[in-house]
Amino acid sequence: MPDLSAHIDPVQVRAALDLSLTESDLPDATIQLPLFTGPAVAEVRRRDPQAESREGEELEHIKNALNLLVAAGLALSFPQITRQQSAEGDAYQRNVVSATDLAADLRQRADEELNEVIGADTTSTMPTFFGLATGRRGR
């Protein structure tokens, strides 16, 4: 059973951020830095302790969640270029996308992928703060 970080695919991460990104724009080595992969792997392990033993369709959801979480981490540190002009005078401009909105969207998509595996019921993992206590008021 491979380590979860082995399932992180730089091509998928780049595609999640922007379909026009190439390896020269965002190198594989940058995507695979522990600064970005570590928190993604930790989040998946925290949410699904059996993530490393998943197979088939469940494993695909785990891989998608990992790649989306890495992309979310990168979204906040990736420069947002909105306008570019070449020496020949060719200009290109694109809509401004909020990095925090993009990161939140990627995290939401990762949550959806993980919920496909572990279910959306998070109440079973929540600690119980209140219990039944005997009442003695008014005696």
Image (spheres, rainbow, N blue to C red):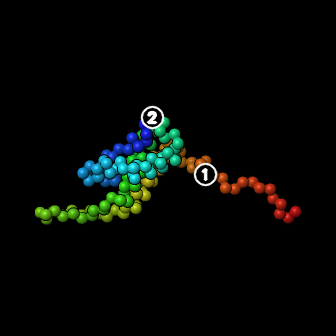
- Given the image, on which type of amino acid does mark 1 rest? Met
Quarter containing the C terminus: bottom right
User: Residue 48's x, y, as percent?
Assistant: 51, 44
At horizontal 29% and vertical 52% (from top left) the residue drawn is 26
- Pick whichever of labels 2 and 1 is earlier in the sequence: 2
At horizontal 43% and vertical 39% (from top left) the residue drawn is 3
- Given the image, on which type of amino acid does mark 2 rest? Met
Labelled disc at residue 1: 2
Task: Give the foreground label among 2 and 1.
Answer: 2
The reply, left or right, for residue 89 in relation to residue 11 is left
Quarter containing the N terminus: top left
At horizontal 40% and vertical 61% (from top left) the residue drawn is 101
* Rendering quarter of residue 76: bottom left
Instruction: Residue lying at the far right in this picture: please name it.
Output: 139
Numbered-mark total: 2
Q: Is residue 62 above or below residue 106?
A: above
User: Residue 10's x, y, as percent?
Assistant: 33, 46
- Res. 68 in view: no
- Res. 121 in view: yes
* Rendering quarter of residue 133: bottom right
Labelled disc at residue 45: none
Label 2 neighbour load within 10 Å: few <14, some 14-19, many 20+: few
Label 1: which residue?
126
Q: Secondary structure at mark 1?
A: loop
Instruction: Residue lying at the far front in this picture: please name it.
Output: 34
The reply, left or right, for residue 12 in relation to residue 111 is left
The reply, left or right, for residue 117 in relation to residue 99 is right
